[in-house]
Amino acid sequence: MSAQTYTGGCQCGAVRYEVSLELGEVIACNCSRCGRLGSLLAFAPAQQFKLISGEGALTEYQFNKHVIHHLFCSTCGIQSFARGKRPSDGADVVAVNARCLDGVEPEKLKVKHVNGRAF
């Protein structure tokens, strides 16, 4: 599957973005945060992500090692993406919640389960 450009955002529409990524497989993590949120994560290099609107509406949460910037809409509370660094090389990446991408049917995605509790 090749990279495709998607739009997405939060529930109320305050946060909107565009991202080019491959949705061949998404990650379902069972860490204390992702397990509660039910996020299905797809990763893209930061330069393939463009925040269209809502920078001022974002609230940040960090936990554990404080390396991922979990960003959520301060109005509706939806976390549609996060920013961080790829562990292998330190490159800037964005983790997009595939459930927040326009026109994507999450039940049709291939899901890889990751034991984030072990990190």
Image (cartoon, rainbow, N blue to C red):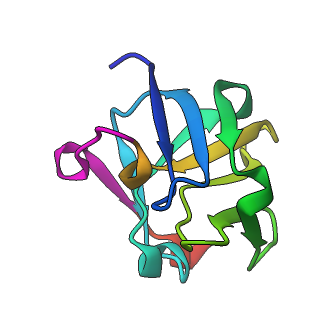
Task: Kindly indicate the quadrant of the structure image that contains residue 76.
Answer: bottom right
Direction from residue 114 to residue 19 in the image, left or right: right
Residue 16 location (% of width, % of height):
58, 44
Q: Is residue 109 above or below residue 68?
A: above
Given residues 65 and 96, the one toward you in this image is: 96
Does residue 118 appear in the picture of this structure? yes
Residue 75 location (% of width, % of height):
61, 72
What residue do we see at 65% from left, 25% from top? 48
What residue do we see at 73% from left, 26% from top? 47
Direction from residue 97 to residue 24 in the image, left or right: left
Residue 99 location (% of width, % of height):
37, 54
What residue do we see at 42% from left, 52% from top? 100
Q: Quadrant of the N terminus?
A: top left
Residue range (magenta) = 102-113
Given residues 75 and 94, the one toward you in this image is: 75
Report the number of numbered marks. Answer: 0
Residue 29 location (% of width, % of height):
45, 66
